[in-house]
Structure formats: structure tokens, C-alpha cells
Image (tube, rainbow, N blue to C red):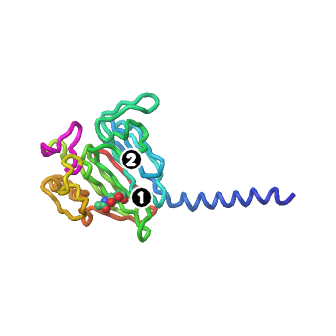
Amino acid sequence: MVYHKTIPTVFLFVFVTLYFVISSDAATFTVRNNCPYVVWAAANAPGKPGGGRRLGQGETWNFNSDPGTTQARVWGRTNCNFDGAGNGGCQTGDCNGKLVCQSYGRSPNTLAEYSLKQYADQDFINLSVIDGFNIPMEFSSASGQCTRKIRCAGDIIAQCPSQLRMDGGCNGPCPVLKTEEHCCNSGKCGPTPLSMFFKQRCPDVYSYPKDDPTSVFTCPSGTNYNVIFCP
Ligand SMILES: *[C@@H]1O[C@H](CO)[C@@H](O)[C@H](O)[C@H]1NC(C)=O
């Protein structure tokens, strides 16, 4: 009767080992709303379960993200209404009318973007206003080995150039004007007066498609992160 006991034990060992291999490196994201208004926080990465949560002033939401996650985004939505089943919509950042996002949001939305455990075991993080700006944000490491803090908290909405103004936000030049100059599908383009409007107020943000040298930051994989609305 020995093997009745040993087979489950082997499986248990495998699961426990797998659990530690997977979870030891997962990054914890703490999303906090410091705005004096409600923000419906959202997170999505292609092929991963999405997320979304209503955050009153001072409330936080924690979630984990696996190593190897790419093209992930955290953003905030404003002026939302959802029914009991989580269907409805938002003025900015809406993700197909769902409380729990399974897709990216609609511009304008300020984005905290990340890819975990990529080249040389680094996490790549950035704050992007390519899809516009709806809420001031900070994206920072919550672990001692990386002290990076990226912030975009300028008065972007009030000063927004007239052609980018939208209800609840200041949209990005590409989503509004849809021209090669702003969208850069060819991969060859530079800053424009409209992208510089954002960059002057938020020097660390990703403000146009080739803005990498001043807007991509790395932390060692295993770092945990804070995302703060209205830092
Ligand atoms: C910002 O991060 C996202 C996710 O890692 C990535 O897809 C995007 O290319 C990054 N932006 C830049 C300028 O590298």
C-alpha cells in the first residue's frame, strides 16, 4: 500500500515547488487613489486576466502580476456608472463598458505600462501620455532595490491645447489627429509642438512614439510597484 501514499506526496511536492517558483517572482502592484474624487482603477495585459475596481479617496487595490507579463497597463477611469453585474461605462478610460477590464481603455487615459522579467531579468516600466491624460499619476517602485519614481502631475487638463481637449481629459495627438507625424507607423519621427506640451509638464513620460531614451526605466525583476492617482 506504499504507493497509495507516495503518489499523492509526489504530486504535492510538484505543486508546492511550482507554487514557489511561480509566486516567488510575482510582482505586487498597489494602486492607490489620492484624488478627491472616485477613480475606477483598471488593469489589463494581453492574454492575462484583467481587473478593475472602484476606489474612493484614500482606497487601495492590490494585485499580483506574473514574471514574463508584457504590454501590461494600469490606468484610471472617471465618471463611471456600472450596474450590479459590472456593466456600464465611463467618461474616460472606458474598457468596453466593463467594470472588470478585459481590454485596454479608451483615450484619453494616462497609462502606467510595464513588462516584467524581460531582457537581463529586468522589468521595464513607463508612464505614457501617448493615449492622452485623464488623471495625474505616479508610478514607482515599492522595493528598496529600485528607487525609481515616475510622475505626471502637471496641470495638463486645464492647459490642454484646444485641438486635444475632450470631456474629462486631454487626448494624445495620435488618437485625435491620426497622422503619420504623430502616430509614427514608419518608426521615423520626432517630437512635435503637441508632444512637447506634455513633455514640458511631465519630463519623464513617454510623449511621442520614439521618446524611448528619456521615458523607459528599468528595475530588477521581483520589484513591487505603487501606482498612485493624484500623487
Ligand atoms: C512602455 O511599456 C510598455 C509595456 O512594457 C511597452 O509596450 C512600451 O513599448 C513602453 N514604451 C516605450 C517607449 O518603450
Region in magenta: 160-174
Q: Toward the viewer: 118 or 145? A: 118
What mark, if any, has residue 114 been given in the picture? none
x, y (%) of residue 72?
A: 39, 53
Residue 220 is covered by the magenta coloring? no
Tell whether 87 sits left or right of 79.
Answer: right
Number of disc labels: 2
Would you name the residue on which mark 2 appears? 31
- Disc 1 secondary structure class: loop
Q: Is mark 2 on a helix, strand or loop?
A: strand
Q: What amino acid type should be assigned to the residue bearing mark 2?
A: Val
The 10 Å Cα crowd at callout 1, few under 14, some 14 to 19, many 20 or more, is many
Which numbered marker is on residue 70?
A: 1
Quadrant where the N terminus sits is: bottom right
* Beta carbon at label 1 within 8 Å of ligand 1: yes
Task: Using residue 120 as the reference point, say whether residue 109 is left or right of it.
Answer: left
Residue at point 82%, 56% (across, down): 4
Marks 1 and 2, Cα distance to the nearest angstrom? 19 Å
Report the front residue among 82 and 179. Answer: 179
Q: Residue 145 location, x and y as percent?
A: 40, 65
Look at 34% across and 42% down and name the residue there: 33
Decide: is 207 above or below 168: below
Q: Is mark 2 within 8 Å of ligand 1?
A: no
Q: What residue type is labelled 1?
A: Thr
Residue furthest to the right in view is: 1
Local crowd size for mark 2, using a 10 Å CA cut-off: few (<14), some (14–19), many (≥20): many
The residue sitting at the bottom extreme is: 120
- Residue positioned 25% across, 57% down in the render: 206
Compared with 205, 155 (above or below) is: above
Question: Which residue is painted at 46% across and 62% down in the image?
Answer: 222
The quadrant of the rendered image in which ligand 1 is seen is bottom left
